[in-house]
Image (cartoon, rainbow, N blue to C red):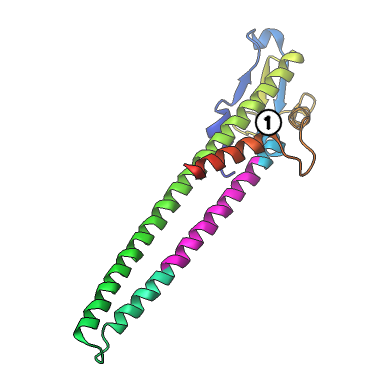
Amino acid sequence: MNISLRKVAFGLLLIVICGGSVLAQGRIATIDLSKAYNSYWKKIHAETLLKDEQTSMEKELKSMQDAAKRINEEYQKLLDSASDPAISVEERDKRKSQADDKLKQLKQKQEDMVAYRDRAQVDLTERRKSAVNRLVSEIRNVVAARAKGANYSLVLDSGNEAAVIYASSENDITADIIKDLNANAPASGASTDDTKSDKKSEKKGKNQ
């Protein structure tokens, strides 16, 4: 997902876990939040669902474009035939009227195509934001739980150069967080509650 985690998700450069003084307790851990996020199985799963929806949108848009192309071809044929000097005035007027109707169909199809594309793009953007926010919230909870359990009073993002000048790997909990995040990852190909929920939402949206 081409969304800045630090702008959309984590916001703060550091996460305060305990309410006590950092100087008094002195236990600080580091985590590469970007690495943890990108290694989370639900992030990969969410991207797959979004890519499938993107593909579906593109197929529908292509179908609408093909339909518009066919209507345009029919319109051009009617327009050309209306100029045939061999036909009667009545027939010429009839074909011109048919051409006008076909042109109206073409314009409506083009408007429908633009409206569909705009709606689909907005929907995809909102779903991406929603997925990022949900996953970030889950990661924050996992970080907080592990930090509290290990009595860390502060957790710094080692992947953010603006927040950390130097950090040894001694108290880096990135691998532990990734392990916790993926502890309940389903076997390859297995469906998940998130999958079912997303599919139900997608089906509901199409029926509306």
| Chief SS of the magenta region | helix
Examine the structure image and report whether residue 55 is included in the region drawn in magenta.
Answer: yes
Instruction: Name the residue: 46% across, 44% down.
Output: 122
**Position of residue 193 in the picture relative to residue 110 (left or right):** right
Q: Is residue 164 above or below residue 66?
A: above
Q: Which residue is mark 1?
A: 158
Magenta region, residue range: 46-68
Of 60 and 127, nearer the camera is 60
Residue furthest out toward the left: 89
Of 56 and 118, nearer the camera is 56
Of 136 and 174, nearer the camera is 136
Amino acid under disc 1: Ser
The x and y percentages for residue 92 are 23, 82
Q: Determine if residue 17 is in view.
A: yes
Q: Which quarter shows the N terminus?
A: top right
Find numbered disc 1 in the image and state the secondary structure of the residue it sits on: loop
Give residue 38's quadrant in the image: top right
The x and y percentages for residue 158 are 68, 31
Instruction: Name the residue: 56% across, 51% down.
Output: 54
Total of numbered circles in the picture?
A: 1
Instruction: Name the residue: 67% across, 18% down.
Output: 154
Crowd rating for badge 1 (residues with CA inside 10 Å; few <14, some 14–19, many 20+): many
The x and y percentages for residue 117 are 44, 53
Instruction: Name the residue: 39% across, 56% down.
Output: 112
**Position of residue 170 in the picture relative to residue 23 (left or right):** right
**Position of residue 122 in the picture relative to residue 32 (left or right):** left
Examine the structure image and report whether residue 61 is included in the region drawn in magenta.
Answer: yes
Q: Determine if residue 128 is in view.
A: no
